[in-house]
């Protein structure tokens, strides 16, 4: 939103900005008198801020600067959303005199329009929004520390990091793999333990030396950043917002700092004292001791011993309702006669309320709300962190927030970068980059073409063989794949809710062999082992329900492990070795089978026919798994290629309902509106065209023949003749009805007169009725005569118009006489 120049700010403002009503003038008189009494009674207190000049240099009561408003944005219905919006949207400006109240303040709408304001103006705006949505909010006038009044957050912990939790996804994966007892174990470490001990000593010594240097550097930086004694400590004026418990289900009271949007506990050392609080309905002066800060402050506003009010409904509530009498103190006796008259007028007026706010209602359009920050971006430095905020659609990458963490307090060496996005076409929501380990963690919203939910990889990791972890939204995958973990030598897939009870698949890869020839021949890594894990299928006996099946691709061995039965500590196992003859025959001999059963007498469960069928099924399953694994590798490669293309051709999605940004929808809507207006214009022109009803009967031809022109002309004249005759018929009918009624009344009067039943009241009523009927009869006669004259004129005027109409130029007949018509 563009700022309004000071010299032209008054031009577009309402008259309430430049004038005061009688009630406002009376309130100002009362405020001056109240301030004089307070200064006389409490000489050690700072003069109250009751009156301030607005942007038009007109004095206004401080309470009338507030204008409770509610904006049509869901985010601004809650206190944290309001506070964050004001902190981001308005640029904080420190007071010109840190220990004095400002003499001139802007209205909330002007603050939003210029996107700049001091602590008072930001507090006005925030309090107006909070009260507008139902919070019990108050502006607080008091004193704060230097860091608060100068908006120096370089020594504070970033709010995003204050409650954040960091998880290393790769470490979790490696730890889980290390706990798996069925992984192929690494070869035994044969290195010398003594040499390892010596190397560890050297590393510990180096680390100790680096730690010592780091501590010295931190001590030096802490000394350099050590806050110097503030000569204005306890005197720095500041304004913030208080939200009391009760309304909007607020359980406990708290402060809101408008410059940062931070929620502050009542027991805080950031605020050093309170002079007064106010809202749009009253003004309360603090009568409690703030020598030890505001931690012990009690906000019982009904207790007049703690809070003195300026506006009160109780005539005995203290000096807030007492008007000074003549001679009450020496200072008041020296006032001139004009002030005495003003005081007397205020006294006679009795108790008054705070006038309605003179400010404009707070309004902001969606484009300005989405821009969020002045010029669309804002950067804040915190302790070892930097926070960047961007408005919607301002950054071409869809970046909304970027948090950069540093290893030092000078904001030089980056350790981690965390970014949040919105409206991206690839549905990327978050991205975290660890500068030390080069690890990248991407988080996606629902809607990605590959149903990606998370993607963890390292910088420079190219191809499907690199270490990476992908998690998926289950609703978008037919195979119920939840997570896929990959290293250069292994791939682990996790499934959820499958009908075949599969929940895990592991694949071990060998080293790719270098071959000459087309690249397609060696694009796959050799597969060494495939192992699948299954949950319990209760429809089968436990000792016949496979829990794991392992396929060794090099040796051809197949190992099956079944679920444990009851309280057994061991399980049934079957192992098939590679046959010596042709594999296509699936011939099975007993020397190829190794079987272990928990109950040695229960071998009948595995007959030779069952073993043959099971072996044949496992060989077919192995071949299918080979294809599945290759398809998985192709899918990973395609996903990575697609992600590269998405990053290269990134676009921001615009809602079809966002008419201000969706140019295609806006253009289409404007075209439809244009067509609609054109149709209305044409319809109105046709309604005005006296020939259109007669031309439509002929099909609305572009040119009329002589016969058609004669038909249209005669139809138009006949239509006028019928209308005129119809109007004349109505008037004649009214004339006959009134004449008949008059005759009936006269006959009734004569009959009653002959019978001798008439009275003076009846005679008077008869006279009035006859006069009314005679008036209506005479009026109708005059209208009939005028209608006859006007009909002839209108007919002649229409005939002349038809003669001049170019569409009837083909007519060659004689003119019609009015005697033939009327």
Image (cartoon, helix red, strand yellow):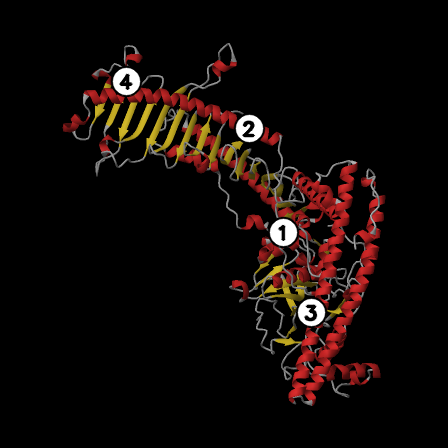
| Location of residue 772 by image quarter | bottom right
What is the x, y in percent for residue 24? 75, 73
Q: Is residue 674 above or below residue 34?
A: above
User: How far apart, in angstroms, are the residues tagged by discs 4 and 1?
Assistant: 68 Å
What is the x, y in percent for residue 504? 37, 32
Q: Are marks 4 and 2 in contact (CB under 8 Å)?
A: no
Which of the two discs, 2 and 1, labels the residue nearer the N terminus?
1
**Residue 577 image label:** 4
Q: Viewer-nearest of labels 3 and 1? A: 3
Which of the two discs, 3 and 1, labels the residue nearer the N terminus?
1
Which of the two discs, 3 and 4, labels the residue nearer the N terminus?
4
Q: Which residue is mark 1?
A: 155
Is 740 displayed left or right of 74 in the figure?
right
Q: Which residue is mark 2?
A: 642
Q: Viewer-nearest of labels 2 and 1? A: 2
Helix, strand or loop under label 4: loop
Helix, strand or loop under label 3: helix
User: How far apart, in angstroms, are the residues tagged by discs 3 and 1?
Assistant: 99 Å
Q: Are marks 4 and 1 in contact (CB under 8 Å)?
A: no
Which of the two discs, 4 and 2, labels the residue nearer the N terminus?
4
Q: Which residue is mark 3?
A: 737
Near mark 4 (Cα within 10 A), the count class, few <14, some 14-19 or many ≥20, is some
Which of the two discs, 2 and 3, labels the residue nearer the N terminus?
2
Helix, strand or loop under label 2: helix
């Amino acid at each position: 939103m563009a700022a309004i120049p000071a010299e032209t700010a008054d031009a577009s403002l309402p008259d309430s900005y430049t004038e005061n009503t009688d009630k406002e003038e009376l309130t100002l008189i009362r405020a001056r008198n109240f301030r004089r009494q307070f200064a006389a009674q409490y000489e050690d207190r700072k003069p109250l801020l009751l009156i301030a000049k607005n942007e038009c240099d007109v004095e206004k009561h401080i309470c009338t600067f507030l204008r409770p408003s509610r904006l049509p944005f869901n985010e601004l219905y809650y206190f944290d959303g309001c506070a964050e919006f004001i902190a981001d949207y308005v640029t904080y400006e420190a007071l010109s005199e840190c220990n004095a109240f400002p003499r001139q303040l802007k209205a909330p709408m002007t603050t939003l329009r210029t996107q700049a304001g001091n602590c008072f103006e930001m507090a006005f705006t925030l309090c107006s929004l909070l009260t507008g949505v139902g919070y019990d909010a108050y502006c607080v006038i008091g004193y704060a520390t230097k860091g608060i009044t100068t908006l120096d957050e370089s020594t504070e912990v970033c709010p995003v990091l204050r409650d954040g939790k960091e998880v290393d996804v790769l470490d979790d994966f490696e730890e889980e793999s290390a706990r798996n007892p069925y992984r192929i174990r690494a070869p035994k470490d044969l290195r010398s333990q003594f040499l390892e001990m010596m190397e560890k000593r050297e590393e510990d010594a180096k680390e100790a030396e680096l730690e010592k240097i780091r501590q010295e550097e931190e001590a030096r930086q802490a000394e350099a950043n050590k806050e110097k004694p503030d000569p204005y400590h306890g005197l720095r004026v500041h304004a913030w917002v208080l939200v009391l418990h009760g309304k909007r289900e607020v359980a406990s009271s708290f402060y809101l700092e408008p410059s940062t949007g931070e929620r502050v506990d009542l027991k805080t050392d950031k605020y050093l004292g309170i002079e007064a609080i106010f809202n749009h309905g009253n003004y309360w002066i603090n009568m409690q001791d703030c020598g030890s800060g505001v931690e012990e402050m009690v906000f019982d506003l009904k207790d007049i011993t703690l809070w003195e009010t300026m506006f009160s409904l109780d005539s005995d509530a203290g000096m807030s309702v007492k008007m000074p009498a003549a001679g009450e103190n020496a200072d008041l006796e020296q006032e001139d006669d004009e002030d005495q008259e003003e005081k007397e007028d205020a006294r006679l007026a009795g108790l008054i309320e705070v006038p309605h706010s003179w400010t404009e209602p707070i309004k902001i359009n969606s484009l300005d709300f989405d821009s969020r920050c002045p010029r669309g971006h804002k950067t804040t430095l915190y302790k070892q962190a930097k926070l960047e905020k961007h408005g919607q659609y301002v950054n071409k990458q869809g970046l909304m927030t970027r948090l950069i963490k540093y290893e030092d307090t000078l904001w030089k060496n980056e350790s981690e970068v965390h970014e949040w996005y919105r409206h991206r076409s690839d549905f990327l929501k978050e991205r975290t980059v660890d500068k030390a380990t080069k690890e990248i963690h991407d988080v996606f919203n629902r809607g990605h073409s590959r149903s990606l939910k998370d993607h963890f990889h390292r910088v420079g990791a190219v191809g499907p063989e690199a270490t990476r972890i992908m998690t998926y939204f289950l609703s978008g995958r037919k195979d119920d794949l939840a997570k896929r973990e990959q290293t250069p030598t292994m791939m682990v897939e996790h499934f959820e809710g499958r009908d075949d009870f599969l929940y895990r698949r592991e694949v071990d890869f060998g080293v790719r062999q270098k071959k000459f020839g087309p690249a397609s021949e060696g694009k796959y890594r050799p597969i060494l082992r495939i192992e699948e894990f299954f949950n319990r299928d209760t429809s089968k006996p436990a000792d016949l329900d496979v829990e794991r099946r392992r396929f060794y691709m090099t040796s051809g061995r197949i190992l099956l492990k079944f679920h444990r039965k009851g309280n057994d500590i061991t399980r049934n196992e079957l192992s098939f070795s590679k046959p010596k003859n042709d594999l296509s025959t699936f011939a099975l001999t007993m020397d190829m089978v190794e079987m272990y059963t928990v109950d040695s007498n229960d071998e009948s469960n595995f007959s030779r026919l069952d073993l043959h069928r099971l072996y044949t099924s496992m060989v077919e399953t192995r071949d299918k798994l080979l294809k599945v694994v290759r398809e998985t590798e192709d899918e990973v490669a395609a996903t990575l290629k697609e992600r590269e293309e998405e990053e290269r051709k990134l676009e921001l999605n615009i809602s079809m309902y966002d008419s201000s940004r969706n140019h295609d929808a806006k253009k289409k809507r404007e075209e439809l509106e244009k067509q609609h207006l054109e149709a209305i214009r044409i319809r109105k022109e046709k309604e005005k065209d006296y020939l259109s009803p007669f031309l439509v009967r002929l099909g609305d031809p572009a040119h009329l023949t002589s016969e058609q022109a004669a038909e249209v002309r005669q139809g138009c004249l006949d239509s006028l003749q019928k209308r005129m005759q119809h109007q004349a018929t109505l008037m004649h009918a009214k004339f006959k009805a009134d004449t008949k009624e008059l005759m009936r009344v006269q006959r009734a009067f004569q009959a009653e007169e002959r019978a001798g039943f008439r009275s003076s009241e009846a005679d008077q009523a008869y006279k009035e009725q006859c006069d009314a009927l005679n008036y209506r009869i005479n009026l109708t006669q005059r209208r009939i005569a005028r209608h006859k004259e006007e009909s002839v004129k209108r007919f002649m005027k229409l005939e002349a118009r038809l003669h001049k109409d170019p569409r009837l130029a083909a007519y060659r007949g004689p003119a019609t006489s009015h005697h033939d018509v009327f």
